[in-house]
Amino acid sequence: QVQLVESGGGLVQAGGSLRLSCAASGRTFSNYAMGWFLQAPGKEREFVAAISWSRGRTIYADSVKGRFTISRDNAKNTVYLQMNSLKPEDTAVYYCAADRIPNRMGALPQGNAQFASWGQGTQVTVSS
């Protein structure tokens, strides 16, 4: 089991930027794809972005394409989410997650059930 701890959330004005970090411990971090999800009040948790365990392949939800960037530093066991041009509708608790399958080949995971470990979440609030 991998333990994940998110940080970097906060309050920002619309148009601003935040960088979320997720520090991992436990399993071999570099063997697992990583993802970010968000959950707004009263709504289900939804996919934001994912990055592969090797070669840095990425995938994004349509709502954040061109504004958010996911990256990872395997030497630091950390995955990041750079969020630019933030909108009030980005307000949510953001979670990072580790893939259920090591060294996944093919399509990147996007579904909740494809991830086995979750952090506690970090609140992002974007004011208008």
Image: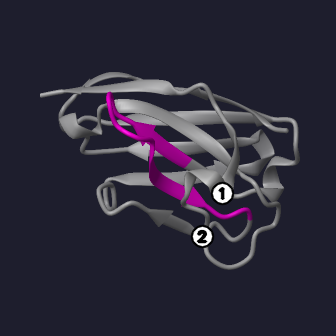
Q: Within 10 Å of the Cα at label 2, are there few (<14), some (14-19), or many (20+) other Cα atoms?
A: some
Q: Compared with residue 72, is residue 77 higher up or lower down, i.e. above or below?
A: above
Q: Compared with residue 86, is residue 31 higher up or lower down, i.e. above or below?
A: below
Q: Quadrant of the C terminus?
A: top left
Instruction: Look at mark 2 in the image and give the residue it sits on.
Output: 57
Residue at point 88% right, 48% down?
Answer: 28
Mark toward the viewer: 2 or 1: 1
Q: Which x, y percent locates residue 48?
A: 44, 52
> Which amino acid type is marked by label 1?
Gln
**37 on left or right of 124:** right
Assess whether residue 50 is covered by the magenta stretch. Answer: yes
Circle on res. 114: 1
Q: Compared with residue 93, is residue 56 higher up or lower down, i.e. above or below?
A: below
> Is any part of residue 107 visible from this angle?
yes
Residue at point 42% right, 23% down?
Answer: 123
**95 on left or right of 5:** left
> Which amino acid type is marked by label 2?
Arg
- Secondary element under disc 1, as helix, strand or loop, is helix
